[in-house]
Image (cartoon, rainbow, N blue to C red):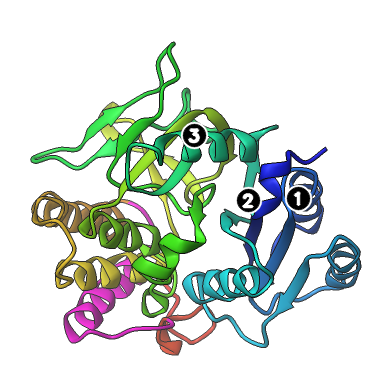
């Protein structure tokens, strides 16, 4: 049964060509934990939507179907607005490929309520595990020249951090009212990073909650690097476009910490080397990344240019 306090929480899931069984399983796992679930679907195809629509309606939630892909940030904002208009005081943001652990909502909400008695808290998030990794991902504090990483210890105390991935983040509605919505112009990549920076600039804190757990898949695949240098997370060419463009957009934002900009600049060169020289499709990767940098300099927002999309005649290499 849903914890009474958790009925103030609305889960917001954004989907884009999901695996139907996995999405239905995610919804089924969340329904007992929250007051409502809203799924914002970015124009996916298939006949899976009607059963989900029926399930959502009967449970007091909603499936908000979009006629075209409006992007992650805009879809999150639609779900947040639905939650606001239906009286929910918190939103739990989730990606379609996340698998929240049992009791995640109660754990996050309890930590948020406790921390908020002494701190100005913008959001809390779970520790998450990519099943392709040997251990849980750390929480991060931005530092120069490299970030400081903090793993959950035996005491399982919440960990102050400088950003949280959006999937699994529990955010009070009144914080969203003050900090503002997700930046729809970013479309997909760095949306969580930008919002976290904006909240931190307004004096809010972010915390990772060790007692809340979630499985989450980062990147399309893993690739072994030469010379025994380990593995690298691989993204497709279009995602590389957004990564390059949006990091330049963040560089120009007044609430972005200069320390992050200083230690992120070398990553631009590393990604150009990795995906433009070592990891294919090299020609298309390089074209998308360079176009992303150019569009970032020009301040371009929204969806990726159509000539970079698969099938446009530019996806060879």
Q: CA distance from mark 1 to mark 3?
A: 28 Å
- Residue name at image x 89 percent, y 72 percent: 50
Q: CA distance from mark 2 to mark 3?
A: 24 Å
Q: Secondary structure at mark 1?
A: helix
* Residue under numbered circle 2: 97
Q: Answer with mark 2 or mark 1, whichever residue precedes in sequence.
A: 1
Q: Residue furthest top?
A: 154
Let me know if residue 204 is in the magenta part. Answer: no
Callouts 2 and 1 close, C-beta under 8 Å: yes
Q: Secondary structure at mark 3?
A: helix
Task: In this rendered view, identify the residue nearer to me: 60 or 274.
Answer: 60
Q: Nearer the viewer, mark 1 or mark 3?
A: 3
Q: CA distance from mark 2 to mark 1?
A: 7 Å
Task: In this rendered view, identify the residue nearer to me: 235 or 263.
Answer: 263
- Residue name at image x 25 percent, y 82 percent: 295
Residue 274 placement, left or right of 38: left
Q: Which mark is residue 22?
A: 1
């Amino acid at each position: 049964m849903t914890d009474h306090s958790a009925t103030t929480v609305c889960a917001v899931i954004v989907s884009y060509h999901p695996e139907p069984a996995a999405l239905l399983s995610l919804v089924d796992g969340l329904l007992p934990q929250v007051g409502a679930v809203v799924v914002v679907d970015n124009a996916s195809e298939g006949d899976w939507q009607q059963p989900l629509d029926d399930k959502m309606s009967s449970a007091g939630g909603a499936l908000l179907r979009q006629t075209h892909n409006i992007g992650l940030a805009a879809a999150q904002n639609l779900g947040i607005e639905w939650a606001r208009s239906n009286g929910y005081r918190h939103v739990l943001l989730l990606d379609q490929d996340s698998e929240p652990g049992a009791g995640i909502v109660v754990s996050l909400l309890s930590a948020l309520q406790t921390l908020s008695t002494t701190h100005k808290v913008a959001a809390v998030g779970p520790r998450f595990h990519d099943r392709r990794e040997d251990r849980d991902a750390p929480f991060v504090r931005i530092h120069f020249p490299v970030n400081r990483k903090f793993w959950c210890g035996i005491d399982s105390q919440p960990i102050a951090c400088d950003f949280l991935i959006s999937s699994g983040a529990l955010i009070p509605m009144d914080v969203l009212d003050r900090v503002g919505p997700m930046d729809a112009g970013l479309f997909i990549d760095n949306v969580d990073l930008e919002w976290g920076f904006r909240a931190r600039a307004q004096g809010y804190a972010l915390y990772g909650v060790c007692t809340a757990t979630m499985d989450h898949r980062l990147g399309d695949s893993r690739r072994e690097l030469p010379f025994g240098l380990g593995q690298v997370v691989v993204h497709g060419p279009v995602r590389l476009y957004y990564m390059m463009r949006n990091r330049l957009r963040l560089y120009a934002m007044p609430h972005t910490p200069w320390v992050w900009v200083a230690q992120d600049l070398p990553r631009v060169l590393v990604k150009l080397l990795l995906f433009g020289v070592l990891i294919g499709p090299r020609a298309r990767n390089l074209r998308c990344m360079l176009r992303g940098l150019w569009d970032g300099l020009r301040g371009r927002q929204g969806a990726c240019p159509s000539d970079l999309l698969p099938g446009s005649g530019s996806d060879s290499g």
